[in-house]
Image (cartoon, rainbow, N blue to C red):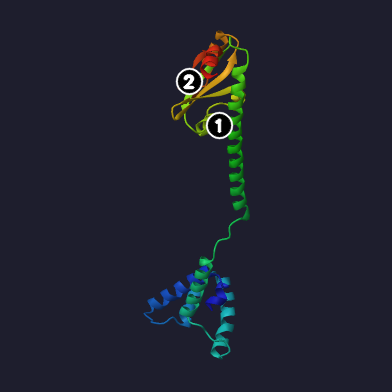
């Protein structure tokens, strides 16, 4: 009867079974009988629903009494649905296919960005050597900072996160070996006179000012790095 009334829905089966058990407990019965099941089904239903339920249940009762339909116990029904629920809960939750695709895509974009920054650093190192060889000793530049590193990774981080992309082509990276160490001097821009360089120095972003940048003449740089 519970199966018939619940339509096989686990939530309704549990509700009806609980009510039947409560009805049996109130009668101090050790078993749940048809009367308790019937009481659980009729409990709380409007009169029209009750009449419809009685019509359907009467057919089932006749079938049970005549032996045509075997009436399963409440325990058997609840164990069946508990087992079904456990199997459904243990089943793996399908993951969307595009979840993996998105991760791969993000990793690919990050790899491309890293390669681009590495190429940018190598290009700026090469351009910096050409820059010093030009006959422009009477000009000026701004020394941003020095980085001590045998690898170019700190330079990559500097260009990627601190210096705006619009200024990358005006960044010059000059290496100087000191014993077992490599010292990278980072310069920004080339200015025709000291006044113009001073204006550019004043307009630097806050994070570029923390290393106390200063103006230096290209004549001095040529003597130091060539």
Label 1 belongs to which residue? 160
Q: Mark 2 or 1 closer to N-term?
A: 1
Tell me if residue 153 comes above or below residue 38 in the rendering.
above
- Nearest the viewer among 38 and 119 is 119
Q: Residue furthest bottom?
A: 66
Q: Relative to residue 67, is residue 192 depicted above or below?
A: above
On residue 34, which mark appears?
Answer: none
Q: Is residue 49 visible?
A: yes
Find residue 189 and report its image quarter.
Answer: top right
Along the line of sight, which residue is nearer the eye, 8 or 135? Answer: 135
Residue 116 locus on image (x, y percent): 61, 35
Evaluate whether residue 43 shows in this view. no
- Whether 134 is drawn above or below 55: the answer is above
Neighbor class of circle 2 (other Cα within 10 Å; few <14, some 14-19, many 20+) is some
Residue nearest the observer in this picture, 35 or 106: 106
| Image location of residue 181, percent across then percent down | 45, 29
């Amino acid at each position: 009867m519970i199966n018939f009334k619940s339509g096989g829905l686990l939530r309704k089966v549990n509700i009806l079974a609980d009510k039947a058990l409560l009805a049996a407990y109130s009668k101090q019965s050790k078993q749940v009988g048809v009367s308790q099941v019937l009481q659980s089904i009729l409990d709380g239903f409007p009169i029209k629903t009750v009449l419809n339920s009685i019509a359907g249940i009467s057919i089932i009762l006749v079938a049970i009494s005549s032996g045509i339909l075997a009436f399963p116990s409440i325990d058997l029904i609840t164990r069946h649905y508990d087992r079904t629920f456990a199997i459904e809960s243990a089943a793996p939750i399908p993951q969307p296919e595009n979840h993996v695709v998105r991760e791969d895509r993000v990793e690919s974009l990050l790899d491309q960005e890293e390669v681009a920054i590495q190429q940018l650093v190598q290009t700026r190192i090469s351009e910096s050597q050409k820059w010093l060889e030009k006959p422009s000793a009477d000009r000026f530049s701004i020394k941003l900072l020095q980085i001590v590193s045998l690898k170019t990774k700190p330079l990559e981080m500097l260009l990627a996160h601190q210096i705006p992309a619009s200024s990358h082509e005006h960044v010059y990276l000059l290496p100087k070996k000191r014993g077992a160490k490599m010292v990278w001097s980072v310069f920004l821009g080339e200015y025709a006179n000291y006044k113009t360089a001073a204006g550019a120095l004043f307009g630097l972003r806050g994070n570029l000012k923390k290393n106390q940048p200063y103006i230096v003449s290209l004549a001095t740089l040529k003597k130091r790095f060539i």
